[in-house]
């Protein structure tokens, strides 16, 4: 029979760590005080717990050591055992227990300090780790390479390059500062903290580089947008032939290829990974699959994924998100089913990816199915998942469900509020957007630029200038007025609300912070309100400064030319868009040219332009031509434009109304009456006009012939009084387009015509 000490040591030394712990558990409890284990046996057991990351066994061994100390052996005060216990607690994610052992040590050596600093650094307690490192220096203890390495890694995790430089200075003073552990940690710290140049310089000075050295610099370069340098370093490492790359090196270079959109390099490195049999590794294979996906090679990404020997949750999420990002919802849902069949449980990242692929009414059914699953799986309380769910309903045109998700959320962050505000603006629930914005303003200490831009979008839709000025004042107060995105939003909204002086004033204040969006917003604003000269002068100023215009800029320029009849100039600007600036004309640009020609009465040229467009004309194109036909009383062109609209949307009321006006203006009352009759029989109704004002902090909306307002009688009485005052002042209604002249028409249409004229024109 071997002694317990010998049995435990033999099992430990043969690598049978679990068996050594089972042998320890089988010891009778009475042996604790009568025959405590040796320091070597306890050290072996603690190390086994550390290797197996078994915290329960570690605590059991620790209690046995404490109980054994009552016989006077003083095992609990043994420095070597205490150091092992600190290391074990650190690796088992129990830094507080590690600190308790450290604080109870009567004698500490550099290993003790290094162990407790590492225990905190490797468990995310970086500030505590650096505090302990500082205490170590004040205590006069010389840090070894392990303490220095842990302190540097803590600085890297905090992203504090300034503090990292101080630790670097301490490493230079230390005898162990040149150790490879410290040097590798410094390379990682500088690379992660945005000082990749310093990290690369330090890396070059390392004489005997190991795999960690190469991995640190390759990963750092890839993360800091130095993809080609990362690939060159990888090539250099492979070329030396000293070190064989592992899965982490391949993972970094595959990510670098994806970021650089370098499919050719990625395919070459893929071949190399096959040579080293790492293409099927979970980590490298996931990065490889992601590389192909980001290079728009989804078939290759899927083939690589299916070669991974045991894809983990990260791998599944990567391939599902790749298909989701391309809007391939059916394929993503198929992969989701396969993932569940494999026994893996989806997490929030899986569901967020699927929800992001749901867009449009056709995807609403799948979105609701995902909603049902996340409720059943207990992920309904995850705020990030709920935010994606809210956005999904908004994209799928189900605004009521988006509001339901918002109201049911117990925890809301700034993304939640911005998502619902964006949904309100997109779905034209502008009054609801203002109400929510007021609640948000009262519930948080400060608003971000996205929230403010959302309320600016709602204000521009309603022409709500007072709210724009309040947002501007708030932005100035909290220091956001210098933000280019918000300043551009303010310029755009001021311009859309007609306050061009305010827009121009803010534009000039921006100075060198102006970008193409700033210029374009002001140019479009000037153009829309008829200030064509100012818009074109601003465009000339922009070109002289060498600022490249975008497609919105040319919309403003073409609109300005259209407003003042500069037909030749407008056609010239349209002709130079693509050859000089690489801007391919869109439907909106073509509509501007059609409007330019039609306003000038050149309807045949406008119609020819429509026929020669590179895409089918849409409703806006036909409406532009129809409105011009009415202005110039061109019945035939008007009929063609109206037919174009009705072929796209047979219930489009504006086409009927404008064509009716053309018939009335030309005196063609028979066709006028026929068209009105057709509108009535098909149920087409003209959308009523709407106006709004803000009174005592509340938005009042008025609709034509609407008497639902509680003060409707007073409102209509006031309208009659205003009308009487207008007549007294000499106002005469414009009747030219319905001139009273004798016309001949079919008597069958007489009653309908008379009724329509009386109803519409009095």
Image (cartoon, rainbow, N blue to C red):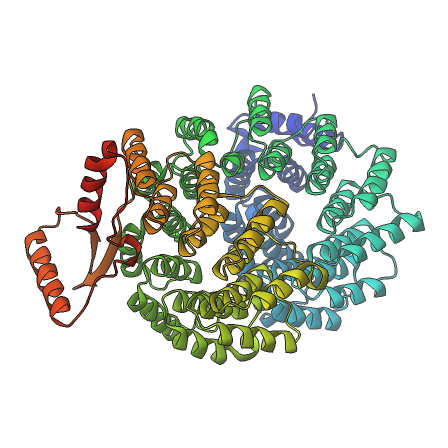
Q: Nearer the viewer, residue 713 or 283?
A: 713
User: Does 241 sit above or below residue 546?
Assistant: above
Q: Is residue 33 visible?
A: no
User: Does 419 sit above or below residue 488?
Assistant: above
Q: Nearer the viewer, residue 401 or 508?
A: 508
- Image quarter for residue 442? bottom left
- Image quarter for residue 202? bottom right
| Residue pictured at 44% horizontal, 72% vertical | 481
Residue 712 location (% of width, % of height)? 9, 52
Q: Is residue 402 visible?
A: yes
| Residue pictured at 74% horizontal, 26% vertical | 307
User: Does 381 sit above or below residue 634?
Assistant: above
Residue 320 location (% of width, % of height)? 60, 33
* Horizontal side of residue 116 vs 165, given as left or right: left
Residue 490 location (% of width, % of height)? 42, 68
User: Does 719 sit above or below residue 269?
Assistant: below
| Residue pictured at 61% horizontal, 38% vertical | 326
Residue 161 location (% of width, % of height)? 63, 67
Question: Where the N terminus falls, by quadrant?
Answer: top right
* Numbered circles on residues, count: 0
Q: Nearer the viewer, residue 442 or 88?
A: 442
* Horizontal side of residue 175 vs 55, given as left or right: right
Q: Nearer the viewer, residue 729 or 29?
A: 729
């Amino acid at each position: 029979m071997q002694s317990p000490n010998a049995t435990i040591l033999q099992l430990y030394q043969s690598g049978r760590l679990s068996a050594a712990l089972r042998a320890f558990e089988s010891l009778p409890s009475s042996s604790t005080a009568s025959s405590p284990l040796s320091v070597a046996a306890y050290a072996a057991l603690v190390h086994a717990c550390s290797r197996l990351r078994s915290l329960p066994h570690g605590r059991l061994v620790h209690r046995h050591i404490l109980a054994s100390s009552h016989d006077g052996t003083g095992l609990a005060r043994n420095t070597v055992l205490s150091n092992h216990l600190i290391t074990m607690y650190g690796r088992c994610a129990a830094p507080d227990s590690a600190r308790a052992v450290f604080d109870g040590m009567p004698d500490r050596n550099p290993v003790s300090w290094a162990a407790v600093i590492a225990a905190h650094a490797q468990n995310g307690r970086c500030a505590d780790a650096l505090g302990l490192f500082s205490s170590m220096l004040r205590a006069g203890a010389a840090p070894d390479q392990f303490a220095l390495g842990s302190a540097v890694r803590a600085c890297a995790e905090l992203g504090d390059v300034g503090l990292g430089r101080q630790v670097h200075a301490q490493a230079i003073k230390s005898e162990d500062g040149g150790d490879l552990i410290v040097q590798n940690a410094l390379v990682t710290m500088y690379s992660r903290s945005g000082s990749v140049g310093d990290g690369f310089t330090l890396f070059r000075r390392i004489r005997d580089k190991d795999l960690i050295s190469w991995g640190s610099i390759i990963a750092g370069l890839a993360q800091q947008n130095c993809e080609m340098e990362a690939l060159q370093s990888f090539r250099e490492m492979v070329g030396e032939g000293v070190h064989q790359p592992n899965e982490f090196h391949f993972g970094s270079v595959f990510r670098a290829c994806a970021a650089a959109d370098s499919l050719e390099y990625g395919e070459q490195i893929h071949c190399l990974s096959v040579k080293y049999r790492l293409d099927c590794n979970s980590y490298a294979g996931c990065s490889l699959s992601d590389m192909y996906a980001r290079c728009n090679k989804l078939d290759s990404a899927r083939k690589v994924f299916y070669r991974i020997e045991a894809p983990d949750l990260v791998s599944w999420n990567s391939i599902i998100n790749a298909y989701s990002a391309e809007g391939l919802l059916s394929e993503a849902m198929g992969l989701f089913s396969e993932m569940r069949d494999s026994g893996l449980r989806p997490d929030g990242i899986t569901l967020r990816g699927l929800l992001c692929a749901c867009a449009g009414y056709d995807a609403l059914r799948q979105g609701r199915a995902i909603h049902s699953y996340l409720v059943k799986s207990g992920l309904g309380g995850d705020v990030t998942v709920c935010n994606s769910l809210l956005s999904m309903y908004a994209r799928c045109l189900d605004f009521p469900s988006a509001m339901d998700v918002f109201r049911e959320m117990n925890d809301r962050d700034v993304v939640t509020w911005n998502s619902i505000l964006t949904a309100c603006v997109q779905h034209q629930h502008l009054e609801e957007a203002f109400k929510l914005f007021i609640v948000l303003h009262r519930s948080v200490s400060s608003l971000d630029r996205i929230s403010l831009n959302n309320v600016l979008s709602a204000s521009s839709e309603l022409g709500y200038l007072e709210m724009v000025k309040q947002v501007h004042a708030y932005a100035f107060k909290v220091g956001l007025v210098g933000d280019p995105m918000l300043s551009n939003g303010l310029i755009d909204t001021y311009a859309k609300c007609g306050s061009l002086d305010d827009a121009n004033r803010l534009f000039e204040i921006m100075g060198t912070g102006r970008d193409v969006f700033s210029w374009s917003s002001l140019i479009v604003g000037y153009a829309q309100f008829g200030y064509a000269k100012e818009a074109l002068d601003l465009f000339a100023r922009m070109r002289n400064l060498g600022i490249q215009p975008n497609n919105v800029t040319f919309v403003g320029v073409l609109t300005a030319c259209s407003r003042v009849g500069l037909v030749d100039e407008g056609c010239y600007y349209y002709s130079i868009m693509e050859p000089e600036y690489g801007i391919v004309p869109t439907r909106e640009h073509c509509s501007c040219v059609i409007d330019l020609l039609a306003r000038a009465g050149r309807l045949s040229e406008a119609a020819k332009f429509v026929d020669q467009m590179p895409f089918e004309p849409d409703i806006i194109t036909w409406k532009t031509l129809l409105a011009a036909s009415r202005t110039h009383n061109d019945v035939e062109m008007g009929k063609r434009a109206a037919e174009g609209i009705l072929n796209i949307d047979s219930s489009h009321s504006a086409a009927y109304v404008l064509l009716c006006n053309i018939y009335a203006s030309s005196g063609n009352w028979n066709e006028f009456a026929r068209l009105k009759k057709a509108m009535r029989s098909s149920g087409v109704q003209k959308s009523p006009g709407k106006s709004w004002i803000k009174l005592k902090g509340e938005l009042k909306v008025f609709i034509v012939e609407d008497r639902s307002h509680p003060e409707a009688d007073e409102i209509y009485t006031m309208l009659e009084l205003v009308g009487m005052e207008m007549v007294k002042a000499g106002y005469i209604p414009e009747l030219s387009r319905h001139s009273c002249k004798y016309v001949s028409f079919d008597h069958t249409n007489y009653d309908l015509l008379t009724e329509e004229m009386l109803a519409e024109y009095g």
